Each structure stands twice: as structure tokens, then as C-alpha cells.
Image: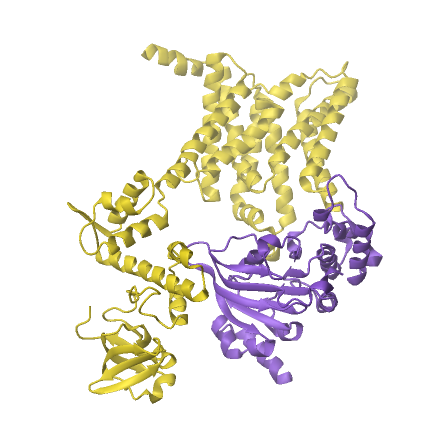
Amino acid sequence: MIELLHTAFIEPLGQAFFVKSMIGGTIAAVVCSVIGCLVILRKMSFLGDALSHAMIAGVSGGYLFMKLIFDVEAYAPAMLIGSIIAAVVTVALIGFVSNISRIKEDTAIGIIYTGIFAAGVVLVSVFHEYIHIDIVHFIMGDVLGIADSDLWVAAIVASIVLTLIILFFRYFQITAFDPIMAASIGIPVVLIDYLLTTSVSLVVVSAVSMVGVILVVGLLITPAATAYLLSDRLDRMMLLAALFGTTSVIGGLYISIWLDSSGGGAIMLFCTFQFLFVLAVAPRYGMIAKKLRRMRMIPQELTEDILVTILREGGKPVSEQVIKGYIHSHDKYLSKGLRLLTQDEMLISSDGGFKLSDSGEKEAVRILRAHRLWETYLQKVGAPEGQVHSIAHHLEHLHDNEAIGYIDGMLGHPEEGPHGESIPADPLQVAKGKKFQLSLLRTGSEATVTAIGERAKKSGLKKGNCIVLESRVDDGETWVVSVGRRKIRLDHSASDDIEVELSGNNH
Amino acid sequence: MAGKKSSNLESALQVKNLTVSYGPKPALLDISFDIPPGIMVGIIGPNGSGKSTLLKSILGFIEPDFGSVNVFGNPLAESKGKVAYVPQRGAVDWDFPVTVEQVALMGRYGKIAWWKNPGKDDRDLVDEALKMVKMENFRKRQIGQLSGGQQQRVFMARALTQGADLLLLDEPFAGVDAATERAILDVLEAAKKNGQTLIVVHHDLATAAEYFDRIILIKQRLYAYGPPEKVLDTDLLSEVYEGNLRVFTELKAKEAAV
């Protein structure tokens, strides 16, 4: 077993080409992934593709230049400079076309890079007697056959680009996030833009020799996208992306050795699977997490229905079986809803079933009050008699305090619904120690006046008076209160403008 | 135009007890109003007050929790084509390869069968509408080459060719200069004279009194509906706008000037 592991993991490390490709690949992947974060956030993924293709023209141009003028075969520095020139020209032409015309940027990229790529293809085929470039090498890359010069190029490019990103991190961040604001505070946005596209060109050029024209885009965007699923901060996203780039190279190289496959292909395959894995399991933005969240979510309507059902059953504990009889919902959801309510300390679970806690009772009363007020409202606005209950059952979930307060006031603070059911007082306002409008008081309650407003000046009530709400007359439009032996009649507007608090033996 | 024949009806738009919600807090609560035909009504209210929800409800994009919307006496579902919508300028791709004339003709698309070409009467309607918004000399222009006010007028023309008698405009005066605002207003006035009913979402309190016959002031519920002098009451506005002072000083300055 240990021997097997040794053959699989340690032995390849003994071979120089493997170590070299691992170092070169890692350097290229790290810088690709880090700058890739900016690329995907600016929605420029297509640009990477464009640059890598346009490079072919630059490489053949550089080759041809040295061959025809100095008769030097495959002079690497010339090819490198050629490809950088091609990349920069591509970027400039894309900017030019999209700036001077109505053509949108993605279309401009498509036009320009295929044009330059085509120029490269024509160049190579016309001068095929002079040029001995293996196009396949460019398309597929050859990470396992990496040359020392490639290694140097990758190292230099990586150090330049990473230094730029670290030095100007804030500038890159703000230019990607809000370019207009960035310009307004004096950041040279255009310069930063060119810096970014030039860096991307450099990075792409250095990585193409390893993973090839087609796969370099993947190295640029996939690790960055993987990190994007896991992080909500750009700096962490860049660190994670670098990590994922590195693991892709290492994992991919081992796979290519074991399967004797193309190095670049194996790296990108590993990178893609890594992305899919993270997509599945990422804690916040992953698929499984999303699914779980949806499954855990209990509709608010259901928990509210449970509370009201238990309230209507009176004070005794209610068994799950009885609740089931009233609420038509999936058993699984119902049990979950009950568990959730118990966790939130709205319900108290005991042997006999479920009982409302203090806070649960308040919530249930509030919803029942909303239901009965909506019923009264519907009756008043002339909803069809047969539908009043079912519409109210839907509307009761609209129980925002302010909205219900408005409906209550509009209806004249009724104490009874259309069929004589009592409408409970607002449990959050009409409570011990709270000050509230006299109009919210229920018949028979005792209260102390704490403030008198403008509209109630002439009522005869004074601050500190102990009152009892005796009755509501004139269809509820007049509040009759007693102060000692005196009876005082108040209209709606006056009773709205008197503030009271509960006193004595109120239930 | 089609507007004339319906002006004898009593109500162009009747909203009754409209309640719309996206959760326990209603976006619109018990909204009722009745707009007679042939007038221009402004909807005002602070950000997030439910203006666009109201607009969407009138267009039938949102199913209300309760309440009804009637257009010229008929429920919304039976009033397809009676209501035209003029979008905010920001919602349009101005580079789109389409001319003034073609945009105006789009108003007819709902009425032309797919196997037919637009007929002479369709073209006549387009001519008429373009003349009305004074854009007949720009018919071959691409829409991006117009000024902000002209663009707004083209979309007005499109609403007119729909043959709709009720026009809903979403902030037509947003981000245009004073001269353009005047030009747009002229078109709205012309449409009104033609018998169309206009409902305009607006956010400039200072000009509201001048522009509209009636104003709807909403913030979740209807705070006021009526003639501007009744609705633009300082106490009422300070309640709705929660003491956003700038608005009131401007309004008071205006009052003082009058």
C-alpha cells in the first residue's frame, strides 16, 4: 500500500521535467487566478479568449521577423515580444471599435480577435516553408515539456503583475466596482484599465505555452469563479483563487502522469471538477446549501395558522393530531413548524400536546385580531358574504402593526366583528405598563389618564383621572367612560387624543 | 382618435379597496379612487411609497390581495389594449436599430395578425399620432439621435397608436431640462384635449400643482386624492414625507411667490 502511494505521488517528484512543470504551472496558475478575479468581476471573460488567440499572430510575426531578417530560427524573445504586441494591439482595437461606434464591447472583442487570429493563420500558411511552428503546441500547450525560457518568462510576468496588483489593489478594486465614482475622486481610471488589460495580455502570453490557447481562458476564470462562490471580499477571493489555481496544477499534473494524458487538459479538467464540487457544497452560494435552506424554510403562513389554531382551542394543551385536523398541510411541514415554534419559545411542548407561551399567545392574539378586523373590513366594503372568511384568512397574514392600526382606526376601533365575535385588543399596545390611546380600550377595562391632547381639551377629563370604559353607544361611535360617579361621553376623535395606561384588575 | 367616444363614461379608472402585499407588510393598503375621463392626474409620494406597485397593479402585472381595478367600467382582465404604458427613459436601449416611425407602429403590433402586414389604417394612425406629438418631421430618425424630450414624445406616440384611452406614464419628467419638460407637458396637454386620460408618476412637488388636475398622494395608503390645492397641504405633506424640509421650503417659497 505504502509502496503504491510512493509510486503514485513521490516517484514523479524525482523527475526534473515533472518538478519543472509543477513550478512553472503553479506560477502561471497563481497569477492567472488572481488577475482572473478582476476579469470575471468586470465581466471580461471573453477578453482572455481573445488575447490568447490573437497571440498566434504575434508569435508567427515574431518568428518570421527574426527568420527573414536575421535568419535566426525560432528565436524565443522575438516570439514573446510579438505576442505581447499582438495582445496590446487587440486590446487597443477593441477599445477603438467600441468607443467610436455603437458596437457593444462583447461584439467588438469577437470581431477583432478573430480578425487578428485569422491574420496569424494566413501568415503561418503562406510562409509555411520558413515557419516551423507547431500550431498544435500552441493550441494544446505542453506543460510537461516546459522550457527553461518559459519558466523565466512566467516568473518575471508573475512578479510584475502580482506586484502591480498588490500595490494598486485599492485602485483596481474601486475601478472594477464603480468606475464613475473612481474617476470623480481623481483615480486615473483609463490608465488603470490599460494596466489591467496589459497585465491580462502578459499573463495570457506566459500561460499559453503551458496550457495552450484554448485552455488558458479556463485557468484565468475558473479558479476565480470557484473562489467567488466562497468569498464575499475581493482580497480573500484573490487568495482563494490562487489556492485553487495551485491545486489545479498539482492535481492535474499527477492525473496526467497516471493516465499518460495531455498535461494542460488534465489541469483544466481537474480545475473544472474542483469548480463543480465547490458549486455543489459551498456553504452560502452552493446548490446543496440553497436546497437545504429552502427545505428548512417553513412558510410563515403555516406557523401563524398553528398559533391561531391553538389559541382558538382555549388554554389547554393541544395535540398534534388535533392541529392536523384544522390545518391542511404536509405532515412533515406541520411537525417542522411545531418544532420551529417550540424552538422560538412561542410554543411549550408538554405531554398533552402544545401550549402557547406568553409571547406565542401575544402573537396569536395579534393574528386573530388581524383576521377579525379584516373580516369586519371586508363586510364593510361589501365583499361577497360567502367569501369573507376565506379572503380574511388570506389577509390575516398581512398583520403589520401599522397597517392593522390603520384598518382598526378606519373602522372606528370595533370591539366586535360582523357576527358578534369579539375582536381582541392589540396585545402589544394595550398591555400593562404601556401608554396607548383611550380609543383602543375594551369595555369594562380600568385605566388611568396620562395625557390629554388638543382635541380632548373640552372632554372634562384630567390627567391622573381613573376611568372605566362603561360602554360603546351610537353604533360604537361614542365611548362612555365613568370617572367616579360622573359619566363622560367621548367621540372618536377625542378618544383618539387621550392617552391612558391600564390600571387595577384588568384581564 | 379613439379617445373621444369614451368621454361620456363616468369613470376612466376606478380603483376600489386595493390591497397588495409582498409579505406581512402591505405595499398598498385599502387604496380607493375614481378618475373621470379626460383629465391628467399625478401620482406623488416618497421613494418606496408604492407608486410603481400601484402602476403595476393598474397594468395588471400584479395580482392584488384584495380589491379591484376597473378601466372604463370594465374589470382589468377585459380591458386589454385600453391601457397604454410609457416606460421610464432609462428602461430603453437607445442604440437599438429602430426608427421613430417603427416605434410608433409598434403600438399597432398587438392588433395586426402575424400573417398580415401593417395596413393603410395602421399607417394613418401612426401619421396622426406623430403629428400630434409634433414628431412627424423625424419619422426616419433612429431613436438614439433624438433629444430626451423627443424620445419621450415618440413613446407617447406609441401609446397613442395603441388606441388606448388611458395612458400611464412612469416619471416622464425625470432627468430632462426645463425646456424639454415644457415640450413633454405640451404633448400631455394635447392628449388630454383629445379625450385621453393620463396618469403620471411624478416626484417634483413644486411643479405638481401646475401640471395636474388632480393629485394622488400615497405612501402605502391613500393620504389624499383631489385637486392640487387640497392635496398639497403642508401638514399632510410633512406627515407623508416625514419632515423632508427641502421639499417644503421650496413649496412655501412657491406659495409666497403666488
Q: Quadrant of residue B37?
A: bottom right
Residue A353 located left or right of residue B201:
left
Residue A179 located left or right of residue A267:
right
Q: Position of residue A188 (x, y in %)?
A: 63, 51
Looking at this view, is B20 or A115 the one in front?
B20
Q: Judge whether A430 appears above or below A37 on screen.
A: below
Q: Quadrant of residue A462?
A: bottom left
Residue at x-position 43% and y-position 36%: A286
Q: Quadrant of residue A208?
A: top right
Residue at x-position 59% and y-position 40%: A43
Quarter of the image with the C terminus of chain A in it: bottom left
Task: Answer whether residue B141 is visible to the viewer in this image.
Answer: no
**Chain coloured purple: which letter?**
B
Q: Judge whether A72 appears above or below B39 on screen.
A: above
Q: Position of residue B2 (x, y in %)?
A: 73, 60
Looking at this view, is A405 or B89 the one in front?
A405
Q: Judge whether B32 appears above or below A361 on screen.
A: below
Q: Colour of chain A?
A: yellow
Residue at x-position 69% and y-position 36%: A109
Looking at this view, is B152 or A392 the one in front?
A392
